[in-house]
Image (spheres, rainbow, N blue to C red):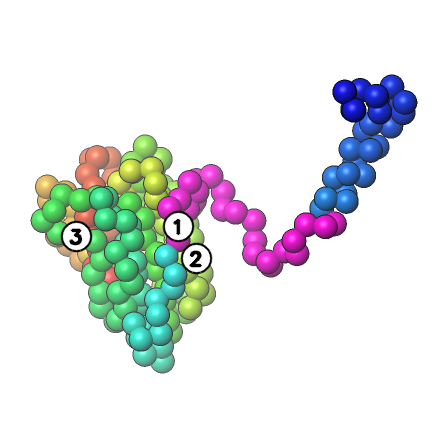
Amino acid sequence: MRVSRVARQVGLSGVLALALISMTATAATAAPSSGRTAPPPANSAHANALPKPPPPPTGVRPDTASPSVCMNAHVENIGWQGWVCGAGIEVGTEGQGLQMEALEIISYSTGGFCAQAHVENIGWMGMDCEPDGSEVDVGTTGLALRMEAVRLEIGTGVLCAQAHVQDLGWLKATCNVGGQVIEVGTVGLGLQMEKLRVTV
């Protein structure tokens, strides 16, 4: 009723002008920006995601002067497992038939880290690359979709990875030198990756 009275008094163009003024005033009085970037795109690891786990606590982090990596796996029926750090680590489960759904990775003294997940019903998602000390996020959470394979790359040094896959067990380890992408897991077989072993 109030809007229609205003519309009669100022006409349609006046209503549009009032709406624009109202939106500008609301934006000006809104809480200041936290400095965070826009939310991730719909196909990223954390679209429709469960709460993101905090980074590894200082006591868990490895000696950052030598190459090392921290990983946290999101697993079916468990959720985020918790951070594991070191020069050689494993995340996920073995012998429980549970699919790995997402990974968070932080590298130290490796020249940065890149990862890309192959996910059920989606295929290869975008490659996520971050410098040392920043989180790389791949896979999905909250969608119950299995990760089937993962591609990994570091900036410098040697990276080795090995996947434990449904019905196949541990597949052969694959290694590379910095700047080369390695791939572990399976594609096109509909098999879930259950555990991942990484050495830097």
Q: In which quarter of the image is the C terminus?
A: bottom left
Q: Distance between the residues labelled 2 and 1?
A: 21 Å
The answer, for residue 177, to whether it is visible in the render is no
Q: What residue type is labelled 3?
A: Thr
- What residue is disc 1 on? 51
Q: How crowded is mark 2: few (under 14 residues within 10 Å), some or many (20 or more)?
A: some
Instruction: Give, as a three-letter code, the residue at label 1.
Output: Pro
Residue at the spot 66% in from the left edge and 56% down from the top edge: 32
- The range drawn in magenta is 28-52
For the question of whether residue 112 can be seen, the reply is yes
| Residue in the image at 26% along x and 65% along y | 84
- In reply to whether residue 39 is colored magenta, the answer given is yes
**Upstream in the sequence, badge 2 or badge 1?**
1
Mark 3 or mark 2, whichever is nearer to me:
3
Q: In this view, does 79 lie above or below 114?
A: above
Label whose residue precedes the other's in the sequence (3 or 2): 3
Left/right placement of residue 18 relative to residue 183 reads: right
Image side of residue 45 versus residue 74, left or right: right
State the count of labels.
Answer: 3
Q: Earlier in the sequence, mark 3 or mark 1?
A: 1
Q: Mark 3 points at which residue?
A: 93
